[in-house]
Amino acid sequence: MKWNLSISFTTVGLLLGSLVSATPIKRSAPKPLQKTAEGGVVYELGNITYFANTKYPKAVLDAAHFEGDGLTLVPITVIVANQSTISGEYLKTTIAEYLVGDDVFSEDFLGSLYLSSTIRNTKLERSALDYIQSLNVRRFYLDSNVIHHEKAAIMLGGVSEKALPSGPYTITVLGASVSFFETYRLYRDEYRDFITGTYASNDGTDSFTALNVMCSKWWDPMIPIPSRIHFWRDSRPLAGTRVAIKDLYDMKGLQTSGGSQAWIRVTPIANTTAPAIQRLVDLGAVLVGKFKLAQFASGANPWDWVDEHYPFNPRGDGYLTCSASSSGGGCSIAAYDWLDNAIGSDTGSSMRRPASVSGTFGNRPSQGMISLEGAIPLGWAQDTAGVFSRDPHQWVRFAKIWYGDANLYQDTSITGLPPLNVPVDSGFPKRILYPTDYLPLANPAAQAILETVLSNMTQLFNMTIDRLNFTTTVTNATIFPEQETANFTNWDILGSFGGALSGYSQQVDVMGPLLTAWAELFDGRFPPVDPAWRQSWTELAQSPVNQSMYDSALKQKAVTTKWFNENILFETPESCSESMMICDIGTGGLPSFREEGLNENANASFLAVLPEGARITCANICPQFACADYTIPLGQVPYQSPITMVTEYYPVSINMIVRRGCDFMLFDLVEKLADAGIIRPVKTGRTLF
Ligand SMILES: *[C@@H]1O[C@H](CO)[C@@H](O)[C@H](O)[C@H]1NC(C)=O
Ligand SMILES: *[C@@H]1O[C@H](CO)[C@@H](O)[C@H](O)[C@H]1NC(C)=O
Ligand SMILES: *[C@@H]1O[C@H](CO)[C@@H](O)[C@H](O)[C@H]1NC(C)=O
Ligand SMILES: *[C@@H]1O[C@H](CO)[C@@H](O)[C@H](O)[C@H]1NC(C)=O
Ligand SMILES: *[C@@H]1O[C@H](CO)[C@@H](O)[C@H](O)[C@H]1NC(C)=O
Ligand SMILES: *[C@@H]1O[C@H](CO)[C@@H](O)[C@H](O)[C@H]1NC(C)=O
Ligand SMILES: *[C@@H]1O[C@H](CO)[C@@H](O)[C@H](O)[C@H]1NC(C)=O
Ligand SMILES: *[C@@H]1O[C@H](CO)[C@@H](O)[C@H](O)[C@H]1NC(C)=O
Ligand SMILES: *[C@@H]1O[C@H](CO)[C@@H](O)[C@H](O)[C@H]1NC(C)=O
Ligand SMILES: *[C@@H]1O[C@H](CO)[C@@H](O)[C@H](O)[C@H]1NC(C)=O
């Protein structure tokens, strides 16, 4: 790649003839900043930073009867018309739509223009040329599909809309060939929620490249965001949706870190993309980066993160927790308008609690909903994959599409449960189960918000609210046959079975391989891992779990799930789940901070506080009983910030829990709540609304 950007436009003037405008519009020239080792160029245009993937062009087209002049790195606008005549008015409207509907495109891309059409023999009207002239387009390329009667343009060989859709690009001209490079706007990850930005390598192998660019002044990774315009006529269901991925899912071509430097040291670059993530790509989503997670998806508190710097939460005073494992996902969705969704995972709380503290929508689906192959496991039989969003309608649409492939349901040998059945047209629950051991919320202002929503919701769906003491209900139940109660209690998520499920998965897939490889590399040494793992792995190494303990635990999980599905959230002819249980996985509306000491204040809270009398936090209900549990933001409450010393706002959310398999029913219910205005989209930044 040449660095000479002092571009001469003399020949262009000749070619454009009458098109040269009398009063030139001032346009920023691209200012090169750096090349990346992977073959790309970062440049500034106006006050915006862009990245062009110059290694693998989107398209290389030949200009007929034109010897190029060695232009390098020129911003260009591609317009693929879908009309049989192109008028000035059409171009004007189209460009206005680009400016309004896309954050990547800017007027600085209009210095050059390539006009093509999806329709053969499209006619270019005089008014179009006049309009192009008024824009002061310095170089004008026309697809050979478009008929015109002016010697005003350079004709380029045809290319399909699929190969080169409309939007901003960067070109380089070499001889007669014009290379079009995919061009991304680079956004600062100013809350440092990401590990790295990523882009599709475009090398024909479906692989990804990590963007090796950061903003050194602010220590931020830069995240490459493609133009939305490219996808406006792309019919794939998730076309152009910008998605961040938790860094425990494999993406071909990238290192999967699991949030551990030691893991990076002993594992290769991923050579395939996890099937659940590949499905997003196939549906048209763009994967813009990998976000931070608690190491190996642990539940570590912010102050116990050692390898990574803990991500920041944009809500309130900026020093609130992001919670544990999918923390970078919830917080990035709360932070960035340029990001649409984030994909995390939930084993014990890791989608739901980050959604709660960031005031976003996030779900733990039913056990088995989508494959976790190609993801670092925490516990094979309890891991699930979920999605964060700011908008209930967008969230529901995305999730239903993503989960819509029964071929990606987990095998019963993984879940230990009956095959998953997900009805799409179930009636709604008739009752809300209100667990008195977990409610009311700790903060009365938050409870008032919950009560309004409950009254709105019961009215909308004609539901009743029934109170129960969940702890007593489970404790009193006869879940296990007599002869087995010695081995398992009704609460064994805490005891042998939960421990055996995740312990054995860890031993086989994470701890085992890491300890072995590290010991070989470094004379028998134990790998540097965050404190949570150092302790539990040391214990696990001393008393390992074996396959028969695992199998037995899996059977017990099936027994408890069956009991739950018959006695608590059961099916009726009218509804997939006769009732819906509510709970709060968060802090009941009290702020929780990234600094340990701040949580000791009476007006603040630690996460995962066990209510008095309860045996488990309500986070653990669905990991034990395989149900679906969604975090729904409801509102926000004021608090006096010990950081900013003024009043800030903390998100209030509720969890909605339904029987395993009733995910689509619950999504339908969420959609109805949004239609009725009972729940609302949240915005990015300090406050939800
Ligand atoms: C760039 O400049 C424009 C106009 O001066 C301004 O509106 C915009 O906010 C600036 N953008 C950034 C990213 O600084
Ligand atoms: C052209 O594309 C736009 C979207 O960019 C669409 O709204 C319009 O219906 C299309 N027109 C035709 C004739 O296909
Ligand atoms: C991909 O990587 C895995 C794990 O490192 C390895 O077992 C497998 O052989 C590789 N496959 C290909 C096609 O390279
Ligand atoms: C509401 O539900 C009650 C039973 O809980 C039922 O008797 C009543 O008919 C229902 N009302 C409507 C309008 O569906
Ligand atoms: C649970 O058992 C205790 C003692 O046997 C009894 O007092 C209580 O009512 C039972 N609670 C439930 C919810 O069944
Ligand atoms: C539970 O323990 C009893 C003996 O106390 C044993 O006979 C039985 O097989 C055990 N059950 C399981 C599922 O491990
Ligand atoms: C598995 O471990 C349990 C408990 O330590 C032990 O009783 C059992 O014999 C082991 N089973 C196998 C197959 O090693
Ligand atoms: C908690 O908040 C209340 C009401 O704002 C205030 O009066 C009280 O002093 C606070 N307590 C602490 C320990 O900060
Ligand atoms: C629920 O039951 C547990 C166990 O019996 C008891 O400790 C607790 O106080 C009860 N909670 C409520 C709110 O009744
Ligand atoms: C919810 O209920 C409150 C009062 O209970 C009412 O003021 C409000 O309008 C209701 N909101 C919706 C969206 O129905």
Image (cartoon, grey):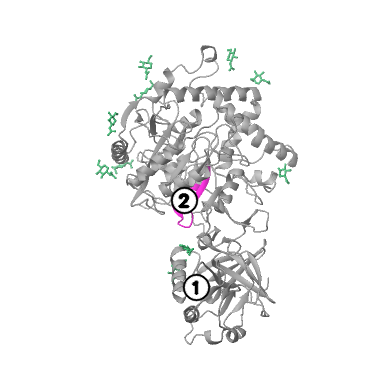
Q: Nearer the viewer, mark 2 or mark 1?
A: 1
Q: Where is residue 566 drawn, in percent x and y?
A: 44, 23
What is the number of callouts on the image? 2
Residue 546 forms part of the magenta stretch: no
Query: Mark 1 sits on what residue?
Result: 85
Helix or strand or loop: what does disc 2 sit on?
helix
Q: Is residue 61 visible?
A: yes
Q: CA distance from mark 2 to mark 1?
A: 42 Å
Q: Is mark 1 within 8 Å of ligand 2?
A: no
- Specify the quarter for ligand 1: bottom left
Query: Who comes first in sequence, dot 2 or dot 1?
Result: 1
Helix or strand or loop: what does disc 1 sit on?
strand
Name which residue type carries label 2: Ile
Q: Where is residue 44 drawn, in percent x and y?
A: 55, 70
Q: Residue at x 47, y 67 (%)?
A: 98
Q: Residue at x 58, y 25 (%)?
A: 554
Dot 1 crowding, Cα within 10 Å, few <14, some 14–19, many 20+? some
Identify whether 223 is placed above or below 143.
Answer: above
Q: Nearer the viewer, residue 689 or 56?
A: 56
- Horizontal side of 232 relative to 258 (left or right) equals left
Q: Nearer the viewer, residue 168 or 426?
A: 426
Q: Give the residues drawn in magenta, as a range.
A: 329-344
Query: Mark 2 sits on what residue?
Result: 333
Label annotation for residue 642 = none
Farthest residue in the top direction? 483
Q: Nearer the viewer, residue 606 or 277?
A: 277
Identify whether 685 is placed above or below 406.
Answer: below
- Residue 57, picture quadrant: bottom right
